[in-house]
Image (tube, helix red, strand yellow):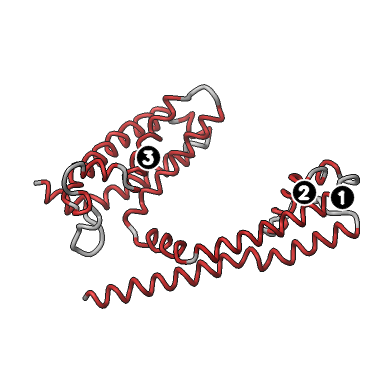
Amino acid sequence: MRQLLYRYVDATAWNRKGLSPFNFAICILIIVSVFLAVIETERPIREAYPYLFLVSERILFALFVIEYGLRVYVAPENPKYSGRFGRLRYMKSGWAVFDLLALLSFMAPFVSNSLAFYIRLTRIFRILRVSKLGRFTQAWDLLWEATARRKFELLMSATIAFILLLVSSAFLYLFEAELQPEEFGSIPRALWWSVATLTTVGYGDVTPITAAGKFFASLTAISGIGIVAMPTGILAAAFSDAFQARQEAGTNKE
């Protein structure tokens, strides 16, 4: 019985194309759960159907508890979690921790229901249940693999970007602090302006006034095109390599 459940519950044990009926149903429940969490942030809808959200949360909580229990129950069928304390090792694994955090998000509204900020925070936690979908796709694994392969290059690009931001902010503070104390009166304030400029988001109508300030702001804006785009190119190349390697491994296996 446990072996049969394992084939349906564990995404890696299903030997047919696509997802098992159990995991397909779980994906639907996750999408429904996230959808409800999103639309609940609209106050008119929340106040019009309070009973709907309350009942749906309790039903979804019960179903996800059953899912978590089944995954823990069948875990020893996986060779990685066989033997003594196998279930405990599974409960400490990445996806099991995600499942547990998703369950805790159902309980959060009952823990903090007085402060508006914490209510909004618990709704954000409920939206994060969408991360449970990661166990059913190879894209998540490929992303982690690509990041691990290029971690040195990513670290270097982040370091260069930070140095550029810090230097630019320091000079902006030096030349603009007296003229615009609210925007450039400290290095942290200037740093925020530099971040907004470097990422090409912009910061409203706030711009340097002095010639030196404009010079360093121009350097920040121009350099930002290359510095911010660098990690994107690194990750794209690494993701492509990881995907190609996965395809070749699957072809050789066949």
Q: Are marks 1 and 2 in contact (CB under 8 Å)?
A: yes
At 49% across and 39% down in the image, what residue appears?
Answer: 124
Q: Quadrant of the C terminus?
A: bottom left
Q: Position of residue 24 (x, y in %)?
A: 27, 52
Report the residue marked by disc 1.
176
Q: Quadrant of residue 199?
A: bottom right
Q: CA distance from mark 3 to mark 1?
A: 47 Å
First of labels 3, 2 by sequence position = 3
Q: Position of residue 26 (x, y in %)?
A: 29, 47
Q: Amino acid at mark 1?
A: Glu
First of labels 3, 1 by sequence position = 3
In the rendered view, tell whether residue 160 sits above or below residue 125. Answer: below
Q: Quadrant of residue 63?
A: top left
Q: Amino acid at mark 2?
A: Ala
Q: CA distance from mark 3 to mark 2?
A: 38 Å
Q: Quadrant of residue 227?
A: bottom right
Q: Which mark is residue 85?
A: none
At 45% across and 42% down in the image, what residue appears?
Answer: 127
Q: Which mark is residue 190?
A: 2
First of labels 1, 2 by sequence position = 1
Helix, strand or loop for disc 2: helix
Helix, strand or loop for disc 1: helix
Helix, strand or loop for disc 3: helix
Q: Report whether 162 appears left or right of 248.
A: right
Q: Position of residue 177 (x, y in %)?
A: 86, 46
Report the residue marked by disc 3.
102
Q: Residues within 10 Å of mark 1 (few under 14, many from 20)?
A: many
